[in-house]
Amino acid sequence: MIFKKLKNNSLKKGLNTHLKARDTSGINARVKSIGFLVDEAHDPDFEKFYDIFKDLSLQSKDIKLFSFVDSKKKLPSLQQNQVQNKDFDWKGNLHNRNAQEFLDHDFDVLVGYYPKQHQILDVLVASSKAKFKVGFQGADERLYDLLLNVPFKDFALFKSELKKYLEVLGKL
């Protein structure tokens, strides 16, 4: 119980530290790569994310996805692009090499694909080196450069709104 409270406080402190240290110099860059941070509890279907490259005139290799899962199932999984609560120690430090590589990647756009604030995913978004960050209405506004006001479950509308705003902002 004490370690959980310490971990939560450390995650909050880490979030604020990452927000202050954010480099926004590349915010107006054109989109050549896009990353998605997804909460598997809300959307376990990943194929649709990889199909978005066609709409954004990108190559499939330019789309990367990383997901959060509360706890791994007992079954073995080949999924390496996952982060869990237990990947953070009580000091709020991330101990997942694949997740750190994803966060260090210099994405032109990072999409936080989860419907509301989420402590772990919010910290991951804040610590990402992405130039431009997109989230959903109801998320922590400090994390994102663009918040889309679309129903979370309507992926087709999300995709069209994302494309529309990226075009309007001169990113496509």
Image (cartoon, grey):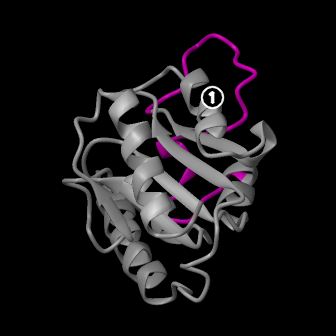
What residue is at 75 percent from the left and 48 percent from the top?
62
The range drawn in magenta is 70-96
Q: Position of residue 82 (x, y in %)?
A: 61, 37
Q: In which image quadrant can residue 100 be found?
A: bottom right
Q: Classify mark 1: residues with Cα within 10 Å, few (<14), some (14-19) or many (20+).
A: few
Q: Is residue 132 left or right of residue 26?
A: left
Q: Position of residue 75 (x, y in %)?
A: 63, 10
Under tag 1, what secondary structure?
A: helix
| Number of callouts | 1
Position of the C terminus, as image quadrant, is bottom right
Query: In the displayed image of the protein, which residue is found farthest to the top?
Result: 75
Q: In which image quadrant can residue 57 be found?
A: top right
What residue is at 63 percent from the left and 53 percent from the top?
34
User: In the rendered view, would you say 114 is above or below 76?
Assistant: below
Q: Position of residue 134 (x, y in %)?
A: 42, 59
Under mark 1, the amino acid is Asp
Q: Position of residue 133 (x, y in %)?
A: 47, 64
Task: Judge whether residue 146 can be spotted in this image.
Answer: yes
Q: Is residue 4 left or right of residue 129?
A: left
Q: Front-most of 163 and 118?
A: 163
Residue 132 within the magenta-colored segment of the rendering: no
User: In the rendered view, would you say 12 is above or below 161?
Assistant: below
What residue is at 30 percent from the left and 28 percent from the top?
154
Q: Front-most of 67 and 27?
A: 27
Mark 1, residue position: 51
Question: Which secondary structure is most common in the magenta stretch?
Answer: loop
Q: Is residue 117 left or right of residue 59?
A: left
User: In the rendered view, would you say 10 is above or below 57?
Assistant: below
Task: Judge whether residue 123 can be spotted in this image.
Answer: no
Q: Front-most of 77 and 163?
A: 163
Residue 75 within the magenta-colored segment of the rendering: yes
